[in-house]
Amino acid sequence: MGSSGKLEQRPAWTRERISKALGESAVRLIAAIAKHAHAENVAIYLAGGVVRDLVLERENTDLDFVLEGDAIAFAYNLARIYGGETERHIPFGTAKWKLDSVAINNLSLGSGVTPVQVDFATARTEEYHAPAALPVVEPGLIAQDLRRRDFTVNALALRIEAGAYPWQMLDPTNGYSDILGKKIRVLHDRSFIDDPTRIFRTFRFASRFGFTLESGTEEILRKAIPVIQRLSGERIRHELDLILREEYPERIIANLSALNIFAQIHDSFRISVRSSELFKRLREHMPQIPGNADDIAHLGWHLLFSNIAEDDALLICARLDLTADLSSSIAGFARLMAKVDWLGAPASKASAITRFLDGISATALRAGLICAIDDRSVKERMELYTVDWRHRRTTIDGNELIRTGLTPGPIYREILDKLRGAWIDGEIESQDQERELFLKMVKEAQ
C-alpha cells in the first residue's frame, strides 16, 4: 500500500547520533561488521526494528543486518575471526552470531551494554503459495527485501559503510513519515492473508508505540481474521508469548478479544472481562526487573485462562502446542478457578483444601492469588496453605506401619493422609496425640 504525501526531512545519522541511541559498544560492534563487509565487498544494511527505534529514540540492542550476499557465510567468517558461535537457518538464508567473552574482548567493545547476539539475513524476496503458509524465499536486493516486510515503519534501513558517516536511510515505502504520524500501515493488500501472524504484531506495535491503525490497514486486517485458523499452534504461541512480554499486554489482549480473534484460535478460547484488571495486578505484584520477564510471561499465560474450564483449557493448550509442563500447570489453574467458592466457604476444612492445592503448581497458585486478591477468605486460605499447611508432615512414616504388621496397600497412604490432615486441622497438637490416633486407625484397619 505505502503512504502518500510529501517526504519528511530525514535526520543525519552521524556516529554521535548512533552512539547516543545504541551505546558506544554497539557502535564499535557495527564498525567491525562494516569493516568486514568492506573487505568482502558486500553491501550491508542495518534494517527493520532497530532503525524504527532509532527514529523513535527508543533503546534497542537487537541488531539486525541485511546483506546483498551470503549472510550465513558472512556470520561464520566473523565468528572465525573474532570468536563466538553461529546458528544458521538455511531455508531463509539467516544466521545468528552469538557473542562470547572472547569475541567481546577481541572486538574491544568495552564495558557498555553489548548485544548478546547479532542477526544477519540475506536480502530476499518472498512468495506465499497459500494463505498462512511459510514463504518460499529467493535472494534479492535490499529494496525488494524492505518491500516484502510487514509494515512501512519496519521497512527502513541504514546503509552501513566502514568509517563513512552519516549513514544513508533507505525508505522505499515512506515509513519515516508514518513513524512521525504514529500510523501502522500495511505494505500490500494480501499481507495479513499471506501471514496472519502480522495481525498479532499489528496490535503489539500499536500498543508499544502508541500508534493507531491506518484506516485501509484496519479494513484489510478485519477481512483476514478467519485465516488465523490456518496458522500452526507453534506460530500462534510465539506471537502470544511476545505479547505477554510487552509492558501492557492487557491492551493488546483487549484489542484482539474485541475482534473475536481468540475464538479463531479455538472455539472455547474466551478472554475474561476481568483480563485487564488481572494483568494490572500482575504488574503490581511482579515489577519489571531483570530476570522477571520469563516469570511474568509464564503467569500471563495462566491469566489468559482465568474463566476457561479445565477440559477446554487442555484443548486450547494442545491447539497452541504448549509444553506438557505449562499445559499441566494451566489445567491446574483452571481447576483452581472452578473451586474458588469452595476454597472460601467456612465449611471447607484446611486438610481438604491442602489435598486439593497439593496438586496445583506453584505458578498456578501465584496466578490464583492474583485472581482472588479481593476475596479475603480465599486469599487468606491460599496464603495459609503456602506458608503453613503444605509444610505439615507426620512424624510417623511407612516403616512404623510395617512394624504394626498391617498388610501393605492403599490403607498405608490413607492412614498417613488422615494423620497429616489431623495436624493441619488442629485435631492433634502433639506427637502423643498423633500416636494415639495412629494406633486407633491401625486397630480399625486390622
Image (cartoon, rainbow, N blue to C red):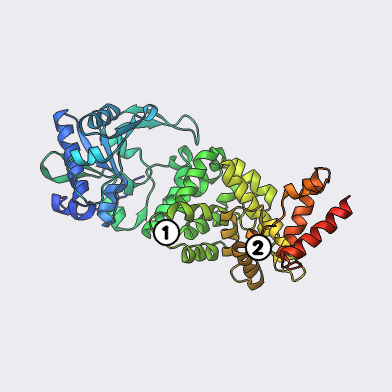
Query: From the viewer's perspective, is 131 left or right of 14?
Result: right
* First-in-chain label (1 vs 2): 1
The type of residue carrying mark 1 is Glu
Q: Quadrant of residue 135?
A: top left
- Residue 244, position as x, y percentages in the image: 48, 53
* Quadrant of the image containing the N terminus: top left
Q: In percent of the image, x 40 and y 53: which residue is there? A: 205
Query: From the viewer's perspective, is 253 left or right of 29?
Result: right
The type of residue carrying mark 2 is Trp
Q: Mark 2 points at which residue?
A: 389
Q: In percent of the image, x 67 and y 48: which residue is there? A: 312
Above or below, 93 relative to 309: above
Q: In which quarter of the image is residue 158?
A: top left
- Residue 61, position as x, y percentages in the image: 29, 49
Q: Can residue 90 be seen in this view?
A: yes
Q: In which quarter of the image is residue 139?
A: top left
Q: Dot 1 surroundings within 10 Å: few (below 14), some, or many (20 or more)?
A: few
CA–CA distance between discs 1 and 2?
Answer: 35 Å
Question: For the residue labelled by badge 2, is the local secondary structure a helix, a strand or a loop?
Answer: helix
Q: Can residue 159 be seen in this view?
A: no
Q: Name the residue under label 1.
A: 247
Query: From the viewer's perspective, is 92 left or right of 75?
Result: right
Question: For the residue labelled by badge 1, is the local secondary structure a helix, a strand or a loop?
Answer: loop
- Residue 378, position as x, y percentages in the image: 66, 68
- Closer to the observer: label 1 or label 2? 2
